[in-house]
Image (tube, rainbow, N blue to C red):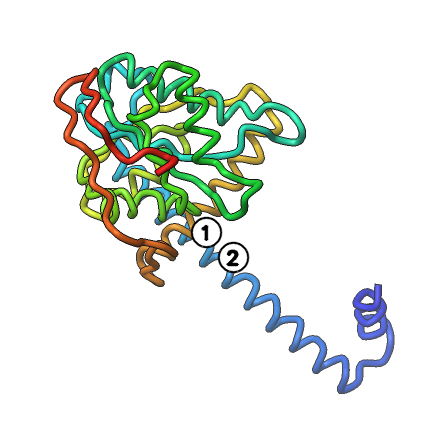
Amino acid sequence: MLLMKFFNRCRFGKPDSSCRRGKRTVLLALKITGGVLVGMVLLSAAAEWYIFSASEGRIFERSADVPVRAPALVLGCSPTFMGGPNGYFYNRMDTAAELWKAGKAAVFVVSGDNSSHAYNEPEWMKRALVERGVPEDRIVCDFAGLRTLDSVVRMKEVFGVSTMIVVSQGFHNERALAIAGHEGMEAWAVSAPDVPNRRSRIKSWFRERAARIWMTLDLWLWRREPRFLGEPVALPEAKGKNDQRPMRSCSS
């Protein structure tokens, strides 16, 4: 309102020095804003190109089509959303269980946020996978997967994995594979179904665009590392689908 009054006074009244200074300030602000917007568009385009290049041909809809047998990284989220079931979570758990049944993964690292006692994504994922037939001693919890970058880099630096299968929705898998490629890892992904809720999909689309820009800055400008690394954790070399050698579980 005050800005409109200022413009009306300068446009229809007698111009003075304050009007001239104000116009220069507004023009400068518009130039800065325009420059920032152009920069964001270019950065977004670069991020999309890099992610597409890194993930092309490496994402599959069916577990049986994944061309490797490797440890699976299951990316976390909450099982509830706005007081109801979170379709993203349950679709990921169903897809991860299919990897086990197809014999494509014998070890599952469930990586997510455990920033408080009341919020424990890895534990929720472990329970869901056990309910779907994955043996509990085949599930390893990564409680420091606070971001996708953390989850992917920790697979390499903490769990010693160089080849893996990522489980999440397609849009998320693309970004995870881009991070893995930047780290020199061989990664494939199987995509869990999206959710039917149109509002949730739109929200996820906009959130993902921002996340991709942030990922590009993390990798190429700030060169950020995971917030927590810690001691290495050795995963067993599974020779068969039903290999039951002991390993570190979520409770250990």
Task: Give amino acid for label 2.
Answer: Leu
Q: Residue beneath label 2, please? A: 37
Do callouts 1 and 2 mark residues in contact (Cβ within 8 Å)? yes
Q: CA distance from mark 1 to mark 2?
A: 6 Å
Q: Position of residue 22 (x, y in %)?
A: 72, 77
Between 228 and 220, the one lying in front of the other is: 228
Between 90 and 51, the one lying in front of the other is: 90
Residue 105 - label: none
Q: Residue at x 45, y 25 (%)?
A: 127
Q: Position of residue 168 (x, y in %)?
A: 39, 29
Q: Residue at x 32, y 20 (%)?
A: 135
Dividing the picture into quadrants, the one containing residue 63 is top left
Mark 2: give few (<14), some (14-19) or many (20+) Cα within 10 Å.
few
Q: Is residue 191 above or below residue 116?
A: above
Between 167 and 108, the one lying in front of the other is: 108
Task: Give amino acid for label 1.
Answer: Val
